[in-house]
Image (cartoon, rainbow, N blue to C red):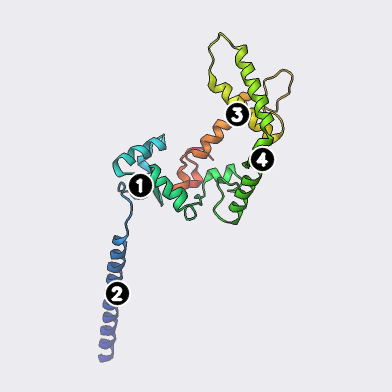
Amino acid sequence: MESSSSSSSAWALSVIALLAALAFFSKLFSFKRDQLKFPPGPKPWSIIGNINLVGSHPPQSLHNLAKKYGPIMQLKFGSFPVVVASSAEMAKEFLKTHDHVLASRPKSAAGKYLSYNHHNITWAPYGPYWRQGRKIYASELFNSKRLDSYQYIRVEEMRAFLSRLCTLSGKPIMLKGHLFHLSLNIISRIVFGKKYASESKYETPIITVKEFQEMLDELFFLNGMFNIGDWLPWLDFLDSQGYV
């Protein structure tokens, strides 16, 4: 009986010691967490976080929240904390001062399906692959000699653009469409070596200008859309918005 009683007492003391240790470490970690200076922001809901505060136009929603919580704020989108910078000063901190820390972008459906599983410079994580891609961009696309070598293309397309406007003299002109065609022709000639889309009766286009513009509009939309599955991974398989 004495042996049984002593073992019970030892077990009880062990449990009490364990609970005391847990309470101590809980207080310790709580104290350390309280010392961290998180940006201000709205209180998140369970599971969805602050997704309920993001409407059909996320930039407008974030702008309105920034008016209340300041130029730097913390939100929670589903399972992930997100820090939002909404001023030129804060953008400089993110994009210049601490750019090497914040250069990677989170993996998303857009990067997976639109850039060969995050294999372009827009969606690739920061690392050797991304740095090599940046070097190629800097040396092959955006250096002054390369840009000067394509000057004749810009001149030819600008003349064609002005010629098209002259033929419409005296009529109402919507410049947006004509400027889009100008940019499209310049870029496609530089990148592909020919006009990717054309409305000329003397050329056989790969695709019509209207079709190509619709493709670009969809591409830009899908790259910037708010996909629920990116923030709530356990709902990803549903593709509830139909974006995937």
* Amino acid type indicated by mark 4: Lys
Q: Residue at x 55, y 31 (%)?
A: 217
**In contact (CB < 8 Å): disc 4 and disc 1:** no
Q: Residue 30 lies in what quarter of the image? A: bottom left
Q: In the displayed image of the protein, which residue is found farthest to the top? A: 170
Q: Residues within 10 Å of mark 3 (few under 14, many from 20)?
A: few
For marks 1 and 3 on the same chain, the one whose residue lies earlier in the sequence:
1
> Disc 3 or disc 4, which is closer to the eye?
4
Residue 230 vertical placement versus 156 (above, below): below
Q: Nearer the viewer, residue 18 or 200?
A: 200
> What whole-number distance in Å separates the C-alpha atoms at marks 2 and 4?
67 Å
Determine which residue is flagged by label 2: 21
**Spatial CA span between label 3 and label 4:** 20 Å
What amino acid is labelled 3 in the image?
A: Ser
Label 1 sits on a secondary structure element that is: strand
Task: Tell me the residue that label 1 is attached to.
Answer: 72
- In this view, the mark in front (4 or 1): 4
Query: What separation in Å lies between label 4 and label 1 (alpha carbons)?
Result: 40 Å
Q: Residue, x 31% and y 62% (percent of image)?
A: 33
Check the image and report above or below for 155 versus 236: above
Q: Which mark is residue 145?
A: 4
Give the distance between the C-alpha atoms of the residues marked 1 and 3, in whole angstroms.
35 Å
Please state, as top left, top right, bottom left or bottom right, where the N terminus lies in the image. Answer: bottom left
CB under 8 Å between discs 1 and 3: no
Residue that appears at 46% across and 40% down: 226
Instruction: Please tell me whether mark 2 or mark 4 is closer to you in this view.
Output: 4
Q: Which residue is mark 3?
A: 183
- Under tag 3, what secondary structure? helix
